[in-house]
Image: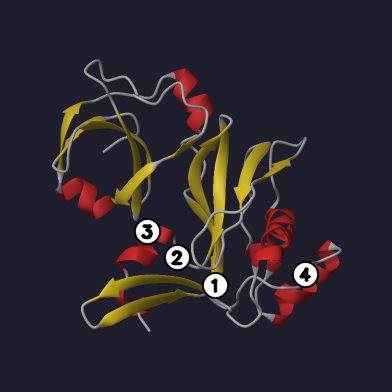
């Protein structure tokens, strides 16, 4: 399986792989000419499924690659997730300085040197409500072509801060079941690829697992 390959899926239609890792595969549908159906849309949330499910329920139709324009827009070289930690949750406190944020990380026994860099000059960060609603996006930019991990997460914590409920240090997801209502809870923090917004790579702020993992992980049921 490679980025750009065209597959026929068992759940309907043909698609092109935009990016993937060991856990998740992101894709978009294609037309009869194997062109991306939503190519003209500057804002997209990618279709996604687990990589295992994709491999088991699709058949390759054509070896292909992304066009240079598609690579520039969708940036498959960027990670699908980064800086995911289970030890703590987003805070209600706003950090005024990076020094304050480093102190917070030390208190959580997280070594700031382990925070991953993000090699691009512009992203859109979308904070996430604790019951899975997207909030107002924020553009982050740098002039160096890289977001250093510490500064990136300093900004992300301050972006998420207005939406944190101090009494609920977790994201929750509810669904109705035969016996009533089922709730899943997800702690931690992390940065996850969502799609593009204005042709700029977009990421959402979540827990230590992605929203897809939250959907399928029964161990998160409380």
The residue located at (62%, 83%) in the rendering is 167
Left or right relative to 23: residue 32: left
Q: Residues within 10 Å of mark 3 (few under 14, many from 20)?
A: few
Q: Is residue 132 above or below residue 36?
A: below
**Residue receiving disc 1:** 188
Sooner in the amino-acid sequence: mark 4 or mark 1: 4
How many labels sit on residues? Answer: 4
Q: Badge 2, how many Cα within 10 Å: few under 14, some, many 20+? A: many
Q: Nearer the viewer, residue 56 or 33?
A: 33
Instruction: State whether residue 68 is above or below residue 158.
Output: above
Residue at horizontal 19 percent and vertical 33 percent from the top: 13
Q: Earlier in the sequence, mark 3 or mark 1?
A: 1
**Tag nearer the camera, 2 or 3:** 3
The percent position of residue 76, horizontal first and vertical second, equals 46, 36
Q: Quadrant of residue 151?
A: bottom right
| Residue 105 point in image, percent of width and height | 71, 73
Q: Secondary structure at mark 2?
A: loop
Rounded to the nearest whole Å, what is the CA distance between mark 4 and mark 3?
30 Å
Q: SS of the residue at dot 3? A: helix
Q: Residues within 10 Å of mark 1 (few under 14, many from 20)?
A: some
Q: Position of residue 61 (x, y in %)?
A: 16, 27
Nearer the N terminus, badge 4 or badge 2? Answer: 4
Q: CA distance from mark 4 to mark 2?
A: 23 Å
Label 4 SS: helix
Q: Are marks 3 and 1 in contact (CB under 8 Å)?
A: no
| Mark sitting earlier along the chain (1/2) | 1
Q: How far is mark 1 from mark 2, CA to CA?
A: 8 Å
Mark 3 lies on residue: 212
What separation in Å lies between label 4 and label 1 (alpha carbons)? Answer: 17 Å
Residue corresponding to mark 2 = 209
């Amino acid at each position: 399986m490679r980025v750009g390959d065209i597959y026929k899926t068992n759940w309907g239609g043909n698609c092109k792989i935009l990016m993937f890792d060991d856990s998740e595969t992101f894709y978009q549908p294609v037309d009869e000419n194997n062109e991306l159906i939503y190519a003209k849309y500057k804002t997209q949330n990618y279709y996604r499924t687990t990589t295992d499910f994709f491999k088991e329920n699709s058949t390759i139709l054509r070896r292909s690659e992304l066009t240079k324009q598609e690579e520039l827009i969708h940036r498959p070289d960027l990670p699908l997730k980064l800086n995911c930690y289970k030890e703590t949750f987003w805070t209600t406190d706003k950090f005024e300085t990076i020094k304050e944020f480093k102190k917070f990380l030390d208190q959580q026994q997280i070594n700031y040197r382990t925070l991953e860099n993000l090699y691009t000059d512009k992203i859109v960060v979308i904070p996430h409500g604790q019951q899975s609603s997207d909030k107002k996006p924020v553009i982050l930019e740098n002039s160096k072509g890289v977001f250093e991990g510490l500064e990136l997460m300093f900004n992300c914590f301050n972006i998420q801060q207005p939406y944190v409920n101090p009494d609920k240090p977790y994201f929750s997801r509810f669904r109705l079941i035969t016996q009533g209502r089922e709730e899943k809870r997800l702690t931690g923090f992390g940065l996850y690829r969502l799609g593009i917004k204005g042709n700029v790579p977009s990421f959402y702020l979540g827990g230590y697992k992605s929203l897809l993992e939250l959907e399928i992980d029964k161990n998160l049921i409380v």
